[in-house]
Amino acid sequence: MVLHHADGSAGPYRGLVRALGARSREAVAIDLPGRGRSAGEPPCRSMAEAVDHLVEVVMRDFEPGCALFGHSMGGLIVFETARELERRGRPAGWVGVSGCLSPAAASARPAADRHLWSDDRLTAYVRELGGTPEEALRDPELRGYLLGVLRADFAVVDGHRAIRDAQLSRTPGAVFCGLADPVASPDGWCRAFRQPMTCHSFEGGHFSLFDQVEEVADRIDAELGRLRLPGPEPGAPGGSGGTARSAG
């Protein structure tokens, strides 16, 4: 399963889904409420809401031991979702986090409260990060919609107070980062996994994965190829055994 960044949707990740499919990895990119196929639903406005939503989706629509991948906000959410899945005795098979701070780094970060920024300041910030078409930012109606979704997403990210020593105990994973990313680095992620984890670096900034989809897919495929994705603990909800329905 693939989860998008703040102010994003499943659409831009279709290239990664196709690339994983070409490597015989069945992948599904999903939308959080408030965008894409879920545009009619109110957006999540806290990490707890986002995690509850994603846990429900995973347990309803995916096999035990599925792999999770998220970029930026999506990375934070899939990490916290994986922690909750472990708590419920149904761990994910693998977690990939991209372009986001580790719990240790996030816990030391001053509160940003970007959802309270003015429209002009938010727009300038989005331009700096890249990844949003300029024509969308120039169209007043579309810009208003995008900024509304972005404010809700930033309420999720900036309202989340990460636990410094938060850790996945049963789930292996990997960290993906752009070497010139202005908002995230791999620092501290090694302490967030008790199981094996690796770090993958790419040339470029916050959205470098979109410029290197084939390379990202190769590395995810190699990561999953080294694993035997686990099912739930005996007696846990969701049955026993199973293989990953989705990767990425």
Image: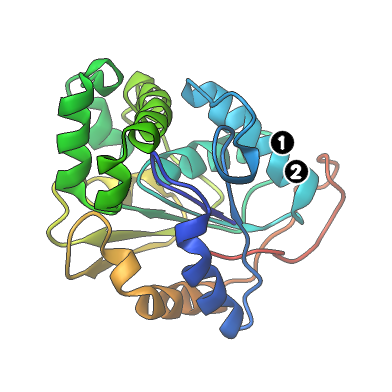
Expressed as whole percent of the image width and height from the top left, the position of residue 103 reads 32, 35
Determine contact: label 1, label 2, CB under 8 Å: yes
Residue at 21% in and 34% down: 123
Q: Can residue 159 be seen in this view?
A: yes
The amino acid type of the residue labelled 1 equals: Glu
State whether residue 248 is above or below residue 8: below
Expressed as whole percent of the image width and height from the top left, the position of residue 48 reads 54, 22
Q: Can residue 183 be seen in this view?
A: no
Expressed as whole percent of the image width and height from the top left, the position of residue 114 reads 25, 23
Give residue 179's mark: none
Q: Tell me the element at label 1.
A: helix
Q: Quadrant of the N terminus?
A: bottom right
Q: Depth check: give the residue in front, 8 or 99.
A: 8
Image quarter of residue 5: top left
Left or right: 186 in relation to 13: left
Left or right: 168 in relation to 230: left
